[in-house]
Image (cartoon, rainbow, N blue to C red):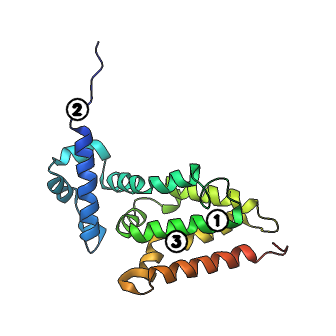
Amino acid sequence: MTERKPRKDAARNRAAVLAAADTLFTRCESPADVTMADIATAAGVGKGTLFRAFGDRTGLIRALYEARLEPVREAVEEGPPPLGPATPPLQRVPALLDALLCFKLDNRHLALALEGNGSDSPYRAEHYERWHTLLYVMLEQIPGLTGSAFTAHALLASVRADLVEHLAGQGRIPREELREQLASFTAKVLGARPCGG
């Protein structure tokens, strides 16, 4: 029996769907305004193609979000300082939070759609668990810091998409000012330890 080869246009369709979805989510007032039919039409594919490839709207959003997040993940897992694994925790924790904040600022439409879709808790999302585990491991290495699991959650809360949108939406707080405020907050959290550091 011969192996069934994937359709030649599957990769092209996937790329077209992700590009169309990204454009539509960027332009819409609310991610909820974009339907699978809208995306299929913009991508020039049938709705069945979308459902076969991504399962549902949330699966499509997740795939697009993960594709955008991949460079950050690679930098954290294999890159040089300050994000890479050879960086001491006191420098790496603020760098990671800054990278996540910048990602959320650049991809607010996707982050809001994924975190606010209502179908599941954002705290159970694969990317959230990944960042929480990484932060927890780094925080455990900082002498005198206690409550690493809670602290990791609290630090991640500062870069949640809904908070980022509330603070930065409609130009309320400029990007660089928001980054400075996050860096200052993170330094206070990491510096508020009984032992000197």
Which residue, given by chain and number where applicable, does mark 2 sit on? 7
Q: CA distance from mark 1 to mark 2?
A: 43 Å
Q: In the displayed structure, would residue 7 be above or below residue 93?
A: above
The residue shown at (39%, 52%) is 67
Q: Quick one: label 2, few (<14), some, or many (20+) residues within 10 Å?
A: few
The residue shown at (57%, 52%) is 79
**Residue 7 x %, y %:** 22, 32
- The residue type indicated by label 1 comes to Val
Q: Of label 2 and label 3, which has the lower sequence position?
A: 2
Q: CA distance from mark 2 to mark 3?
A: 40 Å
The residue shown at (19%, 44%) is 48
Instruction: Please tell me the numbered disc located at residue 93.
Output: 1
Q: Of label 1 and label 2, which has the lower sequence position?
A: 2
Q: Quick one: label 1, few (<14), some, or many (20+) residues within 10 Å?
A: many
Q: Quick one: label 3, few (<14), some, or many (20+) residues within 10 Å?
A: many
User: Is the N terminus in the top left, top right, bottom left or bottom right quadrant?
Assistant: top left
Left or right, 80 with respect to 101, comes to right
Which residue, given by chain and number where applicable, does mark 3 sit on? 159
Between 193 and 129, the one lying in front of the other is 193
